[in-house]
Amino acid sequence: MTGVVEVADQGQGNIQEMEERQETVEKDNTQHKSPVKSKKRFGSFSSFKKKKERKLASLSETEDGRKGEISIETQTLKLDSSSTAASILASDENRKSDGSDPRCNDQVRTEKPEIDMSLGEERGSLSQGKSGKNHHTEVEAKEEKTENVPETLTPTTDSPSQAADSPHVDTNDQASSSSAQCKGQVKSLKRNNMFSSFRKIGKQTKSLRIKQGKFFGGEMDEKGDLESPGLNTSDSATKDRRKGLSRTLSDPTEFLRVKRNLQDEHSKLLTLFEEYPPLEIPDTPLSVMQINCEIEKKHLEEAHVNLLSMRQELKRELQENSTEDLPKEMAMKEKDLNLLYRALRDKMMNVVRNSNNEQPCDTDLLVKVAQIIQEEEKREKDPGSGEWSWRDSWKEAVRDGVKAKIKSVALDTKEQNRSWLAVHLGQLGKAVVEDLEDVKNNLKKCYPPSFDVFNTYVDSYHQAIAQHLKEIHQKELETKDSYVLLKWILNDYKSENMMGSPTLQPDMRKDDLTLPLEDSFLHQIKETYCDQIKGNLKINLENIIKLQEECWTEKKEPDIEDGLYHSEIHIDIWTVVMGYITCSRDFDIHLQEKVAHVCMEELMHFPEWFETRFSEWSKANMASSLGAQYQVAYINSFTVLKGHIEESKKISPNQVTNLEKKIETVVQSLGQMLMDQFKTDLEPYFRRMMTRKWLSTDADFQKILGRVQEISKHCWRMKPPYVKTFVAKVHYHVVREYISQLMKNNYSCKNRKHERAAEKMSLEWGNLQKIFEDTGSTAVWLYPVGKHLSDIIGQSNKKNIKNSLEPLVRDYPDISQQHLSAVLYFRGVTRGRERKLILRKLVELKKTMGDGGFKDQALFSDIHTGGNIPVGCRDSLALLCKSSSLPER
């Protein structure tokens, strides 16, 4: 509407410049001996203007009984129109007196009655109180008369001199002069008609602006312009636009285009104000019962004007009795008035409340509601007005209607539908969008712009939905329900399916996309969601252990995948954990971090739970090969799980680090359980090694070899990198236990049996080394010890033993005199000078080599010596240690 007023102002502001152009045309006619003499017939322009002012003043006093409501600018426009008409009549008179061109004179006589009629209609429109539609019809009729100028009389040149070249010009000079004068007069006449038509449109638009000011509470400035929000008619930009419009209106085609635009905008304004006719307050109101009946029948306008009449009566009575106590009748009248106003307000608010729930909506009734609200806002401080804000009551009614709309959306229980909340929120979003689209397309046009209807409904939906979600959160929600609720609040609400809908966006404020919830409430939903995830994850982990227990009970062998023992335990765990973390990523990064913390903290207890349960089962089944298979499978599974957890280290570094330690602990524990069972299996066979029976049979060694081969097969099914560590442990244990049998002094090879023993030891050692090489043992530093010991034991001459000590001391510097003494005892060197020399040679080599060799690899230091060493040998060893300043072991 502001744009229409601005265009009307621009058009009216150019009338003065158009009249100047008219005067220029008249001067041109005078220079070409035009017979126009307006002053001769009508007198001076100033006297004519004063007469018109008096007439207009009298007309304005009689219009609707409101003196002085016609603006100064409107009067000026009418005076300008009258002056223009006077100039046209003067031109017509002069053309009559000239009589040089009968065709031209006939045309002028034809146009004159229309102009007089137009002036008469202009005068009559000021005093008529007709409806907007009739007035608009008359305006269109008058404009059609103005535009219907015969094309044959349209001037094709801009001056009489140019008209002389026209094909219609006579060869006779006198005829040519008359024709040129006639064409100039017709051109002037047509311009005058254009100006008159433009003034009519401007005058009608100005009248509507005056009505707009009365209805919307605007005020007229000193120049008669209505001050509207956002419109400044005095700035330089507006003046420049007026000048530009004045220049373009010199072109008749451009003038007609602007005229049509003004007519369209004028029609829109007129249509708007037809919905808000001026109130006609009766002098005597209806009775209280009659007014109440009108309210019940929803005859809101009739009830309202009678209430206004009743208020006027009360106001007059209060003024008459201002110094006295109010009579009882006046008090009762004031009470009745208040009760009727409350009834009217309740009925109006009921209309507003149901406007978005009833289809089709009574838009005419809403228009009357808006009109009554605005009328009452103008009279808020008058006696008899309600003790409430009409605008606030309207907003409250809108909110109540929105709440009713939300409650109408179906809400099933958890027993009726497992996805009850997801279904409800989906239907709620659809209902909100449909309702807002209806507000935009239907309800919005029933209110003036000041009501800001669309955004009022949007704000109401924000508040109502926020309260509705709080009520839902009080219900017993499951994890999936909390997820759906968070997703709907944080993602769906502002998506294109709801508030971000392309159909709603043009009318919606940018900050209205997000649901305005308190941070405390949103935090509460997130905390509930995290607690539910923690509880669900615990249940999921318990179910995973139960599934494994079923496999143990059924003695089902683990699957083999890519040549490795395979368990689904890591897949089950990580699927659940990553499901929670990934879903929370859709909301915000802080919630994702919180969910990751919760999952890692709860998962931290799982390795201990699992180890405890598996240990209880494995105590009774460890001797079987099935136990070893499960141990290897779980080692593989936890190794993979550790790699998965590494992916979340950026989100939850501390929790992931602690969890990795827990997983590594359970992997080591599973490997130790396998190793302990392996040690238990080998112990009876190693106990009978390095004895007389050992020399005669290899049954015990074959048992050992079989167990080593079996565990090597399990190692082949084990996933790196732990397999290397485990194989190295197995390799070390076998070597240490084998050598430990030499240190027990259970048997001494006499009578050249040491050669057989050395040969047997070399053979057995070669078999063990081959198995560990095939298994991929990284403990290659253990390979030489068997050869070194077999060389010492197999020496036929005792003196040569000293020469075999250097490789042994170089590779295993932790060997002590007690260890070497035990080896010599097994060799059969139990006493004598050579034995002392050998031990002394060891001391010298250790001094010479120092701590060289494999510093981080200890073998002999982890082997204890003991057994049946003769007393003399122990005494001589003690003396040797004392003399060599070496500590006795």
Image: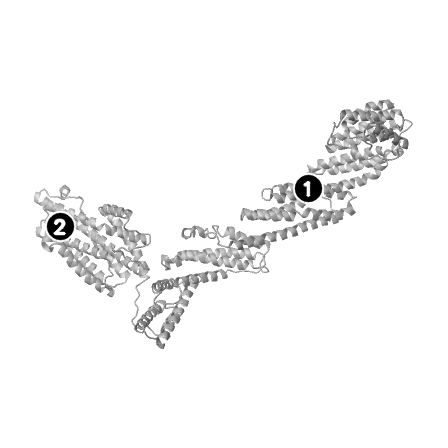
**Residue 700 in the image: x percent, y percent?**
85, 36
* Helix, strand or loop status at disc 1: helix
Q: Which of label 1 and label 2 is nearer to you?
A: 1
What amino acid does circle 2 point to?
Answer: Cys
Q: Can residue 358 be seen?
A: no
Label 1 Cα crowd, 10 Å radius (few <14 / some 14-19 / many 20+) = some
CA separation in Å, label 1 and label 2: 114 Å
Q: Nearer the viewer, residue 259 or 152?
A: 259
Q: Earlier in the sequence, mark 1 or mark 2?
A: 2
- Which mark is drawn over residue 774? none
Q: Is residue 396 left or right of residue 483?
A: left
Q: How is the image coloured?
A: one colour
**Residue 622 in the image: x percent, y percent?**
77, 44
Q: Is residue 751 above or below residue 653?
A: above
Residue topped by disc 2: 104
* Helix, strand or loop status at disc 2: helix
Q: Can residue 764 be seen?
A: yes
Q: Is residue 340 left or right of residue 33?
A: right
Q: Nearer the viewer, residue 863 or 299?
A: 863
Label 2 Cα crowd, 10 Å radius (few <14 / some 14-19 / many 20+) = many
What amino acid does circle 1 point to?
Answer: Glu
- Quarter of the image where one finds residue 351: bottom left
**Residue 550 in the image: x percent, y percent?**
72, 50
**Residue 300 in the image: x percent, y percent?**
36, 67
- Asked if disc 1 and disc 2 are in contact, CB closer than 8 Å, the reply is no
The quadrant in which the C terminus is found is top right
Residue topped by disc 1: 664
